[in-house]
Amino acid sequence: MAERKFYYHHLTDDLVVSRQQDYQLPDNYSIFPTTSASKAWAKIIRLSGGLISLVYVRAIARIQIVGKEKLQLVSDQGYFIYGNHTQPFGDIVLPLSLVPWQNYYAIGAPANWGIPILGKLVLPYFALPVGQNLKQSGKLISAVTQVIQAKKTVVIYPEAHVWPYYTKIRPFTKTSMHFPVALHAPSFTMTTTYSRLHLGKRPRITVYIDGPFYPDRHLDKKQAQVQLHTQISAAMQRRAHLSNYQYYTYQRLV
């Protein structure tokens, strides 16, 4: 029997709301650390995150990762990873078990920067905030470009909001493919699935890596986004069908 039940009106609803949901970053914030102290702290945070990921993935959540070796096909260039957003904590640390701790960046909602401790001492050193106006959006574009050109990795959860243990892929916009198309960079999918264990109530977590997927340079940008969106969505949908256990249930309100 499911442990918790969520009610929603639309598949795009934000069901996990923090007290700082309306938090806004000032226009003069710096995405990357600029001082010697902040750069040193960034290394500490990243290295600590790698160790936490190792313990969490292997010993606590016991996540099985299938297809990790595919990432080596583009290890000499920057790339994107698209994942379904179903673990509030796990989705933060899981990618650190896939890519080197020096290379990991994730795009996140500004509300996360308002969370005590996490938003002040952790996120500023590996996360890239979504812009809330033209100036901030320009900062994000510049930051993502810099990361990819440095042959590092950007993780994107295109569904935007976390739905814990949700077993389907929620709709996401074609514009979420903007960056790989604009930067001619490859993408992978990282699909989290849930299956029943013989013992205990919590499900087995298996993560599937698929790709690489490349934008078609013969198409214009909008057409290339549509094509890449179709490929990314299809890969995630195919893997999501492997889930066979609902630990949490979701009911739509009429």
Image: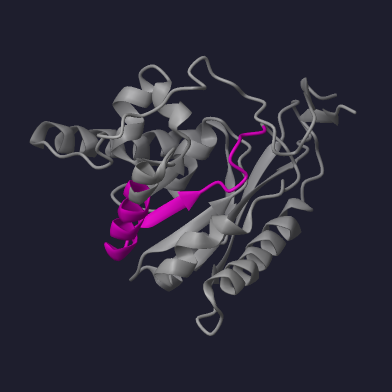
Q: Is residue 245 at all visible to an observer of this figure?
A: yes
Which residue occupies 46% across, 47% down? Answer: 95
- Residue 213 in the image: x percent, y percent? 55, 71
In the depicted view, which residue is nearer to us: 43 or 170? 170
- Residue 62 in the image: x percent, y percent? 57, 38
Query: Is-magenta flag for residue 140?
Result: yes
Compared to residue 48, the image places residue 151 above or below, namely below
Query: Is-magenta flag for residue 124?
Result: no
Which residue occupies 29% across, 65% down? Answer: 149
State the extent of the magenta-drawn residues as a range.
Answer: 139-163
The extreme left residue here reads 36
In the depicted view, which residue is nearer to us: 46 or 117? 117
Residue 252 position by quadrant = top right
In the depicted view, which residue is nearer to us: 138 or 208? 138
Task: Say which quadrant the C terminus sits in.
Answer: top right
Compared to residue 203, the image places residue 97 above or below, namely below
Residue 113 position by quadrant = top left
Which residue occupies 72% across, 34% down? Answer: 203
- Residue 201 in the image: x percent, y percent? 75, 26
Left-right relation of 64 to 182 = right
The extreme bottom residue here reads 218
